[in-house]
Amino acid sequence: MTWKRDFASGLIVLMPLLVTIFVLLWLYNRLAQIPIPVASPPLRVALTLVVFVMLVFGIGYLMRTAAGAVFETALDDLMNRLPGLRVVYNASKMAVETAVSGAEGLQTPVKIEPWPGVRMTAFKTGKKTADGRDVLFFPTAPNITTGFVVEMYPEEYQQSEESVEDALTRLLSAGFGETSEEDLQSVLGDPAAPADADERARDADEDAEATETA
């Protein structure tokens, strides 16, 4: 029914916006409660954000040095020694890395066959295991920030001729992304060409008649 489709379309647009506003308001109220000696709540929130941004830039600059690499390694080792908390730490770190880097870390798309006759898209990460397997990222659709990390030998997956952008378009659109005109022609053939032998024969007869008339 038309009204159901309209209601669903409006809900798809409004719900993410409302959730985003709710999260921003919740975050604002929490930041406004930070005990900073500033009377105005908006100014307190702005000052907190400035301090946080400066802290992020400072730590980011530190990570570019040898001391930063040592510090990160020591922190990872410490957190991985804590039962329970290490799961939360590693999951949140991976989520942030995926959100920040986006698709930039994804390399050549490949095809894997998890079940006989079923092909799915994965991406090379450029990493290898100790026994020589390639580390692949197998994303879900349409949310490519989640997925699975699989380890496979090069002969266990197929190389793909498509670009990263084409593969991501198909995944992000849940398979409904538009196919380029070149791809359609490679699959369906040249639409200007005759469809079958009979049509080609008719075209040949018409050309012959036109020649005799001339």
Image: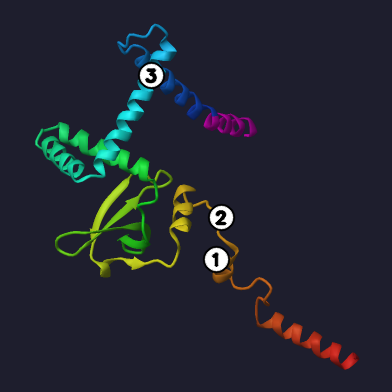
In this rendering, the label closer to the viewer, 3 or 2:
3
Q: Nearer the viewer, residue 158 or 208?
A: 158
Q: Which amino acid type is shown beneath numbered disc 1?
A: Asp
3 and 1 marks in contact (CB < 8 Å):
no
Q: Residues within 10 Å of mark 3 (few under 14, many from 20)?
A: some
Is 127 situated left or right of 73 in this image? Answer: right
Residue, disc 3: 47
Determine the secondary structure under disc 1. Answer: helix
Q: Which contiguous range is marked in magenta?
A: 1-13
In this rendering, the label closer to the viewer, 3 or 1:
3
Q: Residues within 10 Å of mark 1 (few under 14, many from 20)?
A: few
Q: Which quarter of the picture shows residue 75?
A: top left
Residue 2 falls within the magenta-colored stretch: yes
Position above or below: 200 against 46: below
Position above or below: 22 against 140: above
Residue 105 lies, in percent from the top left, at: 35, 52
Residue, disc 2: 178
Residue, disc 1: 183
Q: Which quarter of the picture shows residue 27?
A: top left
3 and 2 marks in contact (CB < 8 Å):
no
Position above or below: 99 against 161: above
Tell me the residue at 45%/26% (across/down). Answer: 20
Is 29 situated left or right of 179 in this image? Answer: left
Q: Which amino acid type is shown beneath numbered disc 2?
A: Glu
Q: First in sequence: mark 1 or mark 2?
A: 2
Give the quadrant of the N terminus: top right
